Image: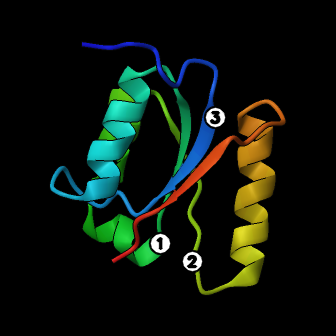
Amino acid sequence: MSYNLLKGKKGIIFGALDENSIAWKTAVKAHEEGAEIVLTNAPIAMRMGSIKTLAEQIGAEIVPADATKVEDLENLVDKATEILGGKIDFVLHSIG
C-alpha cells in the first residue's frame, strides 16, 4: 500500500546492486511512495549487478559515479539536478 509519503520528492540513491541490496529495496519503496530517483553506482559494480533492471522497473535514470572520485560526484550532482528538474531533496548512501 502506498501513502504517497515522498510525492514530489527527488533524490539520488547510491549502491543498488541487485534485488537483495538495501539500496535496491529502498529505491523500489521510495518510487512506490512517489519519489523521483536517479540511481548511481561505481562503473565496476554496475557491470556486476543489475541496476539497469531496477532503473527500468522504477523509471529512473542511471548516472555512473565512483564515490571515491570528487569529479564523478560533481558530475553526478550536476546531471541528477538536470534530470530531476533542478532539485534534490534526499541522498541515500548504501555502498558496501
- The answer to whether the residues at label 1 and label 2 have Cβ atoms under 8 Å apart is yes
**Whole-percent x and y of residue 66?**
57, 77
Q: Which residue is mark 1?
A: 43
**What amino acid is found at the position of numbered circle 3 in the picture?**
Lys
Left or right of 12: which side holds 69?
Answer: right
Residue occupying image coordinates x 72% and y 42%: 88
Q: Secondary structure at mark 1?
A: helix
Q: Secondary structure at mark 2?
A: loop
Q: Secondary structure at mark 3?
A: strand
Q: Quadrant of the N terminus?
A: top left
**Whole-percent x and y of residue 26?**
34, 44
Give the Cα distance between marks 2 and 3.
Answer: 21 Å
Q: Which residue is mark 3?
A: 10
Give the Cα distance between marks 3 and 1.
Answer: 23 Å
Residue occupying image coordinates x 26% and y 44%: 25
Q: Which residue is mark 2?
A: 66
For residue 64, which quarter of the picture?
A: bottom right
Q: Earlier in the sequence, mark 3 or mark 1?
A: 3
